């Protein structure tokens, strides 16, 4: 039972991170290698604010805003200049991730930080005692993901967004401001990652390398699920988090990563476009 | 004159490196001999990235494979192969080549992975390979393997100056081989694949095989570089095959210039040399500076800093074709 809850927990947080990546990729065709570092910004905002005496809940609101602003800056100064050069965006955003990570190391030091848990104690769920903080993380992440899906498919803004993803030139010719949409989406994605980082900060050790730890599973999820639809990543995240936690039940963390990776490579070999996508001819 | 400037400058740099071997002090020669290994690694990456447009975030996998293969043989851990240095270097090249072939088989199949997917797959592979080595008892796990024998002739260890010239010669050979490939008709097809793979396939080329061949050649170069590095460093560890080194070599090649082998080579020599000079004084700030430089180069000077000055004249057969 606890295994299922752990899986759900990982799933919901990974989904938040992946969602930002997918929307940015779908909209701008940019693979954002710095995505994990926006998580880092969120987590370290919480570290700085709780360290200065502010409450965790206030920090939880400020963190995504900080990350979103950082995302906006990255979009403005780097990504918008090169988004038509596909491979270069990978390099440039990776360079940005290097810069952010080093800046964090310079400011906070290379060692892991801890954030006091604001919601200690556990609660009886489905017959097991489960930490209340983790339950909250799960609930909020699932609610946010659902909200985003609804916004994407049921709201006016979502409709416009999907129009730009489907055909950028046509949407722009019909009068949609794609430039503003790019900026909004990039910072939204960054903000989501920042929020995920902030939410996770009390239950994991916050160190400068936590971004990469989430980036690799996110990428694997995208590779498995494909990026051309929104159901794809959902499936990918489920596959990655499910198999990770299942195998982690009896093997070490490191071995699990290796096995999950090998499984992913097999999938990628036979479904290069993602499992849920029909092959284009 | 303008057209041949790059060729003259390239020759001048090689001459300067040769003279350095005569006048340089020992510690400098040892350092530069080590950087030559990075240079060979960069040459391989410039071939696949600059020509074929294959952006690999995992070249260190092959570097590390070469280093470990050399270490295993020379430490006598593979008894059936003996423990000679030559066998070690050969095995390094073979293992790296086989790994590259396997990688190409997985990723270039069918329509093949798009450039971005390929980058992500190689990135994940490098990370996982590093973890896997850390978990492998036989390869020394987290601690790596110590006491890897240096290059020697008979029973005598090579002196610093001899070693420098040996590395100089190997790097020059690797450079000339890469240039020969890049100036051949084959590389023109690779460039076409980079620009539009589907169209090239429709023209009747087996693009998968052509790309794989370039990737395997780069892999062999990386493996060779790894073996030579292990021999000089005397120690192999999981980080040699990991994500960090893979991305470092990307920075060297991007900063130097991806499409010109000499520029990529200079990128490796100059950036790692500068790093050695500045990392003590700047500490953590150095990586920040390097990151900013890297982003600026990618955004503003996509051909790299050295490429414009070092570009070789167009091969005669392509003259007058626009």
Image: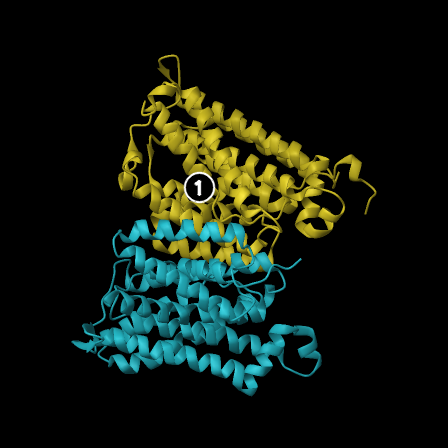
Chain colours: A cyan, B yellow
**Coordinates of residue B222 in the picture (x, y in percent):** 49, 36
Residue B27 in sight in this render:
no
Which quadrant is the N terminus of chain A positioned in?
bottom left
**Coordinates of residue B300 in the picture (x, y in percent):** 59, 59
Residue A156 in sight in this render:
yes
The image shows residue A226, relative to residue B181, as above or below, that is below
Q: Seen from this angle, which residue lies furthest right?
A: B320
Residue density around tag 1, few if under 14, some if 14–19, many if 20 or more, within 10 Å: many
Q: Seen from this angle, which residue lies furthest top?
A: B154
**Coordinates of residue A27 in the picture (x, y in percent):** 57, 71
**Left or right: A243 with respect to A95?**
left
Residue depicted at x 56% and y 58%: A273
- Is label 1 in a helix, a strand or a loop? helix
Q: Nearer the viewer, residue A116 or B156?
A: A116
Q: Seen from this angle, which residue lies furthest bottom?
A: A156
The image shows residue B250, relative to residue A155, as above or below, that is above
Chain where mark 1 sits? B
Residue depicted at x 52% and y 48%: B56
Q: Nearer the viewer, residue B101 or B278?
A: B101
**Coordinates of residue B314 in the picture (x, y in percent):** 74, 39
Number of residue marks = 1
Residue under label 1, please give it: B61
Residue depicted at x 32% and y 22%: B76
Which quadrant is the C terminus of chain A positioned in?
bottom right
Q: Seen from this angle, which residue lies furthest left?
A: A121
The image shows residue A181, relative to residue A79, as above or below, that is below
The image shows residue A1, relative to residue B147, as above or below, that is below
**Left or right: A156 with respect to A243?**
right
């Amino acid at each position: 039972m606890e295994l299922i809850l752990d899986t759900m927990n990982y799933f919901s947080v990974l989904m938040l991170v992946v969602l930002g990546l997918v929307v940015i990729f779908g909209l701008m065709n940019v693979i954002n290698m710095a995505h994990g570092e926006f998580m880092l910004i969120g987590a370290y905002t919480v570290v700085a604010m709780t360290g200065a005496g502010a409450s965790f809940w206030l920090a939880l609101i400020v963190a995504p805003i900080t990350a979103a602003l950082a995302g906006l800056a990255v979009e403005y100064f780097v990504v918008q200049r090169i988004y038509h050069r596909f491979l270069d965006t990978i390099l440039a955003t990776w360079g940005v991730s290097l810069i952010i990570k080093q800046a964090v190391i310079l400011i906070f030091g290379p060692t892991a930080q801890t954030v006091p848990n604001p919601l200690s104690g556990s609660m009886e769920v489905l017959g097991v005692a489960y930490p209340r903080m983790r339950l909250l993380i799960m609930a909020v992440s699932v609610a946010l993901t659902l909200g985003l899906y609804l916004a994407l498919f049921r709201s006016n803004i979502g409709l416009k967004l999907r129009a730009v993803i489907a055909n950028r030139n046509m949407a722009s010719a019909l009068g949609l401001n794609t430039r503003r949409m790019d900026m909004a989406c990039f910072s939204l994605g960054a903000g989501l990652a920042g929020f995920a980082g902030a939410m996770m900060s009390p239950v994991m050790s916050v160190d400068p390398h936590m971004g990469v730890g989430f980036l690799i599973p996110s990428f694997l999820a995208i590779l498995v699920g494909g990026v051309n639809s929104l159901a794809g990543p959902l499936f990918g995240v489920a596959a990655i988090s499910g198999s990770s936690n299942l195998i982690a039940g009896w093997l070490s963390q490191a071995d699990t990563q290796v096995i999950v990776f090998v499984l992913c490579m097999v999938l990628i070999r036979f479904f290069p476009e993602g499992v849920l996508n029909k092959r284009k001819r | 004159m303008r057209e041949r400037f790059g060729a003259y400058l390239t020759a001048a740099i090689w001459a300067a490196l040769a003279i350095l071997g005569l006048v340089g002090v020992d510690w400098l020669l040892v350092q530069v001999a080590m950087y030559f290994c990075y240079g060979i690694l960069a040459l391989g990456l410039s071939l696949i990235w600059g020509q074929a447009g294959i952006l690999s975030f995992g070249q260190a996998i092959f570097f590390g494979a070469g280093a470990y293969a050399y270490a295993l043989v020379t430490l006598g851990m593979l008894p059936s192969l003996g423990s000679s240095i030559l066998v070690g270097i050969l095995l390094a090249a073979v293992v790296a080549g086989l790994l590259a072939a396997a990688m190409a088989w997985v990723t270039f199949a069918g329509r093949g992975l798009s450039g971005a997917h390929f980058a992500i797959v190689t990135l994940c592979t490098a990370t996982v390979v590093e973890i896997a080595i850390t978990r492998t008892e036989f390869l020394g796990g987290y601690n790596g393997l110590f006491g890897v024998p240096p290059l020697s002739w008979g029973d005598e260890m090579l002196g610093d100056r001899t070693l420098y010239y040996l590395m100089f010669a190997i790097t020059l050979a690797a450079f000339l081989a890469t240039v020969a490939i890049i100036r051949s008709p084959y590389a023109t097809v690779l460039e076409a694949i980079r620009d539009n793979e589907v169209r090239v396939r429709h023209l009747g080329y087996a693009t998968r095989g052509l790309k794989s061949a370039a990737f395997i050649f780069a892999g062999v170069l990386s493996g060779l570089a790894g073996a030579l590095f292990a021999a000089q460093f005397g120690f192999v560890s999981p980080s040699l095959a990991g994500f960090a080194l893979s991305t470092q070599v990307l920075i060297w090649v991007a900063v130097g210039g991806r499409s010109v082998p000499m520029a990529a080579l200079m990128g490796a020599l100059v950036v790692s040399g500068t790093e050695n000079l500045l990392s003590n004084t700047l500490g953590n700030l150095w990586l920040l500076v390097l990151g900013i430089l890297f982003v600026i180069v990618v955004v503003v000077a996509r051909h790299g800093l050295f490429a414009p000055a070092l570009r070789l004249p167009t091969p005669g057969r392509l003259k007058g074709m626009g």
